[in-house]
Amino acid sequence: MTLFDSPSFSNHEGVHAFFDEKTGLKAIIAVHSTARGAAVGGTRMWNYGSAAEALEDVLRLSKGMSYKNAVADLEMGGGKSVIIGDSKTQKTPELFQAFGRAVHTLGGCYYAAEDVGVSVADVAEARKVTPYVVGLSDGAWGSGDPSPVTAEGVFRSTLVVAKRLWKQDDLTGLTVAMQGVGHVGGYLADKLSKAGAKLVLTDVNQELLSEVAARTNAEVVAPDAIYDVNADIYAPCALGATLNAQTLDRISAKAVVGAANNQLATPDIGQRLFERGVVYAPDYVVNGGGIINVASELKARQTGGAYDPAWVEKKLSRLMETLEEVLDRSATEKRPTHEIADAIAEARISAALDEKTDRERLAA
């Protein structure tokens, strides 16, 4: 299979592979679209089973970033990067400086930020050799760790869905089966618990799982058992594609609201959820808080201003209005929510591409 034959290739503008022998860096950066501005998206460090697996992941994730940024109405395109390696044992400052040099070769068409396996400190190492990274904590414009804002957006989305399905303003009496309690999941678990939800948690990191469960009074189950929990809401907050042909019939929840990217293994899973009457809050809509936070940093840097929490709040509130629109249109048009969200994102990207083409034609 070649790159262009991949089922995850979707008119990407550029896919770049990097190797640094000295540090062992193996990275792929995928730029899906710059129609709405420079591509922005996180960097994931994961011990992939093969380079082909890493390529498929970065292609899917970068397209998702284009859609996420468009739905959040940000003046940014979509991109993503992956580093092949074990984030627990193979991280070094030199590795991330090598990654920063790789990002720099793209000349600003892509800005990297944090994602799974990558921290603010790691991004700070890359910043030593390139300005094309965001999600930093220093300087007046520094936005810091985007995880808390991502969690806040997922939490508000959960409340939106609870209001529709159970006519209540909090989560009292509802059970949430949460898969993954990492950076975002841990913050989200705290918020859900405080709002009255009963939590059933799982994670491959047993130490972290025990810590989060203790402070939220949650039940703990084995990773594979999370699909069989008798829950009202399923919250996938780890890696993607956990809604698939093998798990779908095991999930009894009436709603899916989680922080993970690319939750649907294939589009037909979204159709099947819709046919079963399950409310699926599209992942790249509800988890857009983190990239909104990052966008404020980029905006401040470009204008010489400072990080603006009020701007972030305004964008996050607008994102919840978009979620309401997606749910309303799904009910009215009798179409799955992921199709509605895709249509909104694609219309915004297409309009921006037309404008960009017109500007380039006039400038020629």
Image (spheres, rainbow, N blue to C red):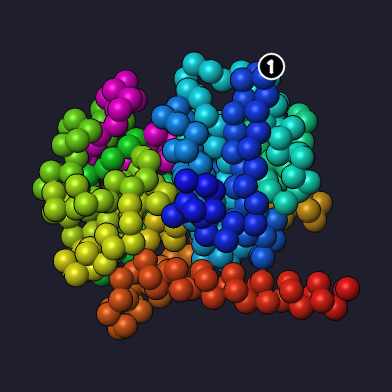
Secondary structure of the residue carrying tag 1 is: loop
The percent position of residue 59, horizontal first and vertical second, equals 51, 49
Q: Residue furthest bottom?
A: 332
Res. 34 visible in picture? yes
Who's the residue at 54% across and 48% down the image?
3
Q: Nearer the viewer, residue 2 or 64?
A: 2
* Circle 1 Cα neighbour tier, 10 Å, few/some/many (<14 / 14–19 / ≥20): few
Who's the residue at 33% across and 56% down the image?
266
- Position of residue 203 relative to residue 274, above or below, is above
Quarter of the image holding residue 112?
top right
Q: Residue furthest front?
A: 1
The percent position of residue 191, horizontal first and vertical second, equals 35, 45
- Position of residue 230 relative to residue 207, above or below, is below
Number of numbered callouts drawn: 1
Quarter of the image holding residue 128?
top right
Which residue type carries mark 1?
Answer: Lys
**Left or right of 26 on screen, residue 165:** left
Who's the residue at 69% across and 16% down the image?
22
Whether residue 225 is in magenta: the answer is no
Q: Mark 1 points at which residue?
A: 22
Q: Give the range drawn in magenta.
A: 182-210
- Position of residue 357 relative to residue 254, above or below, is below
